[in-house]
């Protein structure tokens, strides 16, 4: 009976960290999509090449730092979700938020052509 009680949380924690890795990878994709939007926005605003390059580099660093803080908070949130039995809800919310943000990025890229 003790082995059965041990396996259930272990499976949830393994799922938690698998979801964390997948959502983190989706976040990296979002960073590069946001960087492309910032570059196209700089071109659309007709910034000079120095300003465009500075905005491009600064956006990558800024979004990267935000991503780093976000994945740390995500890991904590998912671990708490395992304990409160809300893992799937929390993961689904983050997934939907990232997909909506990606959709907005690709929509803006189409508008800024």
Image (cartoon, helix red, strand yellow):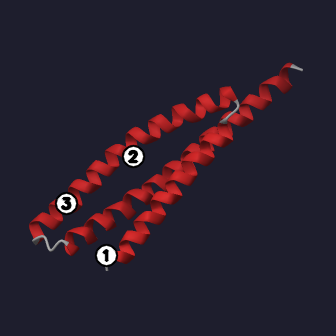
Q: Name the secondary structure under disc 3.
A: helix
- Residue name at image x 82 percent, y 23 percent: 5
- Residue name at image x 18 percent, y 71 percent: 45
x, y percentage for residue 84? 67, 27
Dots 3, 2 in contact, CB < 8 A: no
Q: Which quadrant of the figure has residue 60? A: bottom left
Q: Which quadrant of the figure has residue 33? A: bottom left
Whole-Å distance between the Cαs marked 1 and 2? 24 Å
x, y percentage for residue 24? 49, 48
- Which of the marked residues, 1 or 2, is nearer the chain's N terminus? 2
- Which of the marked residues, 3 or 1, is nearer the chain's N terminus? 3
x, y percentage for residue 89? 65, 42
22 or 84: nearer the eye?
84
* Residue denoted by label 3: 55
Q: Which of marks 1 and 2 is in front?
A: 1
On screen, residue 43 versus residue 99, left or right, reads left
Q: In which quarter of the image is the N terminus?
A: top right
- Which of the marked residues, 3 or 2, is nearer the chain's N terminus? 3
On screen, residue 49 versus residue 80, left or right, reads left
Q: What number is the disc on residue 112? A: 1
Q: Name the secondary structure under disc 1.
A: loop
- Residue name at image x 70 percent, y 31 percent: 85
On screen, 29 above or below 72? below
Whole-Å distance between the Cαs marked 3 and 1? 16 Å
Whole-Å distance between the Cαs marked 3 and 2? 18 Å
How crowded is the residue under tag 1: few (<14 C-alpha within 10 Å), some, or many (20+)? Answer: some
* Residue denoted by label 2: 67
- Residue name at image x 60 percent, y 28 percent: 80
On screen, 73 above or below 4? below
On screen, 111 above or below 64? below
x, y percentage for residue 72? 45, 36
How crowded is the residue under tag 2: few (<14 C-alpha within 10 Å), some, or many (20+)? Answer: some
């Amino acid at each position: 009976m003790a082995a059965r009680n041990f396996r259930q949380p272990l499976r949830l924690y393994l799922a938690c960290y698998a979801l964390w890795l997948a959502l983190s990878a989706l976040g990296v994709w979002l960073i590069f999509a946001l960087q492309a939007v910032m570059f196209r926005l700089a071109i659309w605003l007709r910034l000079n090449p120095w300003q465009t390059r500075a905005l491009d580099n600064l956006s990558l660093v800024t979004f990267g730092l935000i991503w780093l803080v976000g994945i740390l908070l995500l890991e904590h949130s998912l671990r708490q979700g395992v304990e409160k039995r809300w893992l799937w809800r929390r993961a689904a919310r983050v997934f939907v938020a990232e997909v909506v943000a990606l959709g907005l990025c690709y929509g803006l890229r189409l508008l800024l052509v």
